[in-house]
């Protein structure tokens, strides 16, 4: 789509802050008014619109996309999304360790086990870890507790968590990112531990490199979304 506006401005409303393009209110793909509660996030979204060139590129506006996702998908479908997120616990990356080689096993233990310990201590749940490809079921009590915990997250936290989990394939890494236990770069490194090990051995092809860089950007955008909104004094007490 060609750019059709000159200015992008933040407008305060009764519900929060909206974005106006030459005075016309921005709407989500589903037609809802794009409204956020936090002024810094609204300013950053307006900045994304201002930064567009002659052609509007939605993939270069991750904050706008995350805010739209919150309004169009998360709020109308919270219970289903929470259930989907909890399902990741059953196959979580951090709970499936390699049987070898030894240096990979040691690297996983060094990087992943402290995160498993953090999840256990922070959320009061039991996690089972396995080696190899044999499936391990997490305790029913753990899954119920995780569902209750996510039920206390606000809509923006769920939106950020969903984005992080989809990128990394790990609910527990997503929780570490949302709760501030890991930075964006630390989360990316933890999620890519196995891939990084293989690259060190065999190198990386161009297509895989582009995919990794896209993932890195997605995680960084989610981190910034959190920093501009829910990160400010809104951590949950567990």
Image: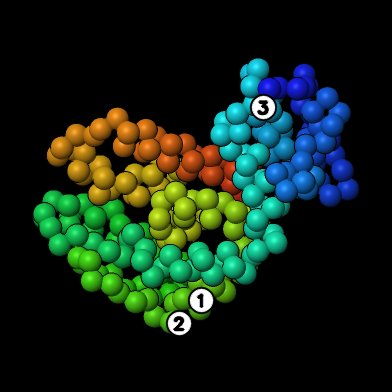
Which residue is at 25% across, 49% downward? 194
Determine contact: label 2, label 1, CB under 8 Å.
yes
* Coloration of the structure image: rainbow
Determine contact: label 3, label 1, CB under 8 Å.
no
Q: How many marks?
A: 3
Q: Secondary structure at mark 3?
A: loop
Q: Secondary structure at mark 1?
A: helix
> Is residue 106 positioned above or below 129 on the image?
above
> Is residue 56 positioned above or below 26 on the image?
above
Which sits in the foreground, 165 or 224?
A: 165
Which residue is at 77% across, 41% downward? 27
Which sits in the foreground, 106 or 130?
A: 130
For this orientation, the residue located farthest to the right is 14
73 relative position to 148: left or right: right
Q: Quadrant of the C terminus?
A: bottom right
Residue 201 % position (x, y): 14, 39
Q: Secondary structure at mark 2?
A: helix
The residue at which mark 1 appears reads as: 145
For residue 1, which numbered disc appears in the image? 3
Residue 118 % position (x, y): 40, 63
């Amino acid at each position: 789509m060609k750019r059709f506006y000159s200015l992008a401005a933040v407008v305060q409303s009764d519900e929060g802050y909206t974005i106006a393009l030459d005075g016309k209110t921005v709407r989500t793909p589903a037609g809802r008014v794009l409204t956020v509660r936090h002024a810094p996030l609204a300013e950053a979204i307006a900045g994304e619109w201002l930064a567009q060139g002659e052609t509007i590129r939605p993939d270069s506006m991750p904050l706008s996309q995350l805010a739209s996702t919150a309004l169009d998908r998360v709020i109308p479908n919270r219970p289903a999304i929470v259930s989907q997120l909890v399902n990741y616990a059953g196959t979580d990356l951090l709970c499936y360790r390699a049987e070898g080689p030894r240096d990979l096993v040691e690297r996983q233990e060094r990087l992943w086990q402290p995160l498993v310990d953090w999840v256990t201590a922070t959320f009061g749940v039991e996690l089972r870890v396995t080696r190899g490809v044999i499936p391990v079921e997490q305790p029913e009590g753990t899954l119920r507790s995780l569902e209750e915990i996510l039920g206390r997250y606000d809509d923006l936290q769920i939106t950020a968590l969903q984005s992080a989990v989809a990128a990394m394939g790990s609910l527990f890494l997503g929780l570490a990112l949302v709760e501030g236990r890991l930075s964006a770069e630390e989360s990316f490194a933890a999620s890519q531990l196995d891939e990084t090990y293989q690259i060190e051995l065999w190198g990386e092809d161009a297509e895989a490199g582009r995919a990794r860089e896209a993932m890195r950007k997605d995680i960084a955008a989610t981190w910034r979304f959190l920093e501009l909104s829910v990160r400010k004094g809104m951590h949950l007490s567990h």
